[in-house]
Amino acid sequence: MNNGLRRRGEITIWLTETAISEWRPAMTRACGRPQEYSDIPIETVLFLRQVFHLPLRQTEGFMNLLARFMKADITIPDFSSISRRSIALPRHILAKAMKPGSLVIIDSTRLKVYGKDEWHQEKHDVLVRRTWRKLHLAVDENHQLLVCELTTPEVDGPTAVPDLLIQIDAPFEIFIADGAYDGEPIFQAVLTHQPDAQVIIPPHKTAVRSAAGDTQRDGHTKVIVQHGRISGQKKTGYGLRNYAELSVQRYKRIIGNVMKACALNRITNLGIPGSIKILKLTRECGLLFKF
């Protein structure tokens, strides 16, 4: 764990030959002035800016220093070009940038969007206007962000699930969410996307079994009735949902209220410890004990 956290502070940056060769966009016959830089340098600069929390001008200077240090035959976009190009960058699918696990754990949280600053409020005698956005995300058992979506507050968690599932191309075995996602539409959406998936969503305390009594939701209801809610959640593996809560906490503490999931995935992978279960066997009085 300590070594992983230390690696987060190590600055080891390099540019591949492919990135350098594609630093400039390919020539096209389109009308108008061609772009001077491809999307690669813009994304690279924005990635480093987010990781090190630098303003645009300082990020430009940092990249110029790196280019000189690596003796790379490239030029760095200026801060105004980075700002303009960042608006229209293509949207990447997170699940294609990693090797996803077998779990999909869904959760959502609210992100505050600030309005005018205090100086503007006092000078123009205007009221502070702050609104909210809702962040919906999905993680796997390796704490990797598979997909994230930013919506208005009116879009609740269950409504956003179909759009999140569309962005997950890799097959998964288990889908986990909290009780707010309980309902037949969510089960149907998950099983339509992945027919063999196991859906683990604790039903409401007033939930009743369906007429057929053969759905996965009916099975969860039966387990809770027989063993209680806490024991039933342990039997179904519902406790893994805390991975999504940890991702939300990590998102807000490390990245903040800005949507930069790719950078967060790389930082998370550097600090996640590798856990190994160790079995210790002892023999006393002819009996075998396992700790």
Image (tube, grey):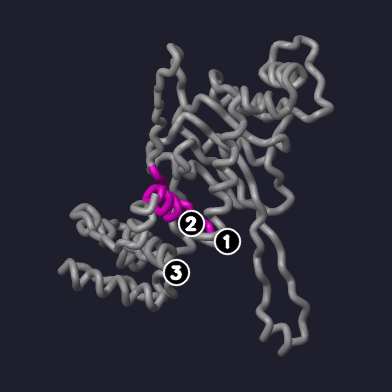
- The residue that disc 3 covers is 53
- Disc 2 element: loop
With 16 as the anchor, is 106 left or right in this view? Answer: right
| Residue 262 among those drawn in magenta | yes
Q: Which mark is residue 260?
A: 2
Label 3, label 2: how many angstroms apart (C-alpha)?
12 Å
Amino acid on which the number 2 mark rests in the picture: Lys
At a point 75% along the width and 11% down the height, the residue shown is 213
Q: Which mark is residue 257?
A: 1
In the image, residue 169 lies at what x, y percent? Answer: 46, 33
Q: Which residues are magenta?
A: 258-273
Amino acid on which the number 3 mark rests in the picture: His
- Answer yes or no: do the residues labelled 3 and 1 have beta carbons within 8 Å? no
Could you say which is closer to the camera, residue 174 or residue 259? 174
At a point 72% along the width and 83% down the height, the residue shown is 121
Q: Residues within 10 Å of mark 3 (few under 14, many from 20)?
A: some
With 24 as the anchor, is 278 left or right in this view? Answer: right
Tell me where residue 278 sits by quadrant.
top left
